[in-house]
Image (cartoon, grey):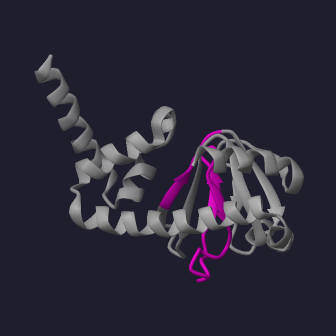
Amino acid sequence: MSDILSSKQQLLTRYFSRRKYASKEMVAYPDDEISQKAFVVTEGVFRVFLPFEDGQEIVKKFLLPGDAGITPYQADGTFVVSCVEAVTAGEIAIAPLDDVLVASQSDPQLMQIINFHRENQISEKAQREIDSRRLGAKERYLKVVDQLGQWADQVPLFEIASLIGISPVHLSRIRKELRQTVTKQM
């Protein structure tokens, strides 16, 4: 996996241009210019979410440095109306999707990265389904915090709650319970 990620970083200079985003800056709207792009997060944390007409949003996932995306289509080819927003200040390398797909025909490294991304996206989706059925809210929260690593403190709790499918109030209770458990163990 590290070979693929280092290859991905090398390819950025060949096919992708970089753009910096401020915290809370929208990167992609459903019909925006990035909607027909391939991208790789190079710095910061970004969230992928589904907006609804009533103003509600559901966070689908967080993107960390090294994560890639091809919008608006998922790996299985289905159309998705997702938005991408910077959670922290960050940078994304972007290339026109058509250019990346044409280049991948003659560049085995790029094809390997695209295939890796597609396989990873499918397994992430399957793992989220399994987790939602097998893990409780506390375990899902701990898993997300572990996945976010150093970025966990910078992601708003209401967005983590949305990702794991619980209310912010329920997440506050879980966090309080975890703090109490740690305090008792000391």
Taking the view exactly as shown, the residue that stands out farthest to the left is 184
- For the point 61% across and 52% down, which residue is it? 67
Question: Where does residue 99 sit, x and y in percent of width and height?
Answer: 87, 70
The part of the chain drawn in magenta is 60-88
Q: Is residue 159 left or right of residue 117?
A: left
Secondary structure mainly formed by the magenta segment: loop
Question: Where does residue 118 sit, x and y in percent of width and height?
Answer: 59, 68
- For the point 34% across and 69% down, which residue is it? 129
Quarter holding residue 185:
top left
Q: Is residue 7 left or right of residue 178?
A: right
The residue nearer to you, when weighing 3 against 82, is 3
Q: Quadrant of the C terminus?
A: top left
- For the point 37% across and 53% down, which residue is it? 161
The number of discs equals 0
Residue 14 lies, with reference to residue 100, above or below; the image says: above
The residue nearer to you, when weighing 179 against 96, is 96
Let me know if residue 67 is in the magenta part. Answer: yes
Taking the view exactly as shown, the residue that stands out farthest to the top is 186
Q: Is residue 126 visible?
A: yes
Question: Where does residue 76 sit, x and y in percent of width and height?
Answer: 56, 80
- For the point 48% across and 60% down, which residue is it? 59
Q: Is residue 170 visible?
A: no
Question: Where does residue 62 sit, x and y in percent of width and height?
Answer: 53, 52
Q: Is residue 53 left or right of residue 19?
A: left
Taking the view exactly as shown, the residue that stands out farthest to the bottom is 78
Q: Is residue 92 left or right of residue 61?
A: right
Let me know if residue 97 is in the magenta part. Answer: no
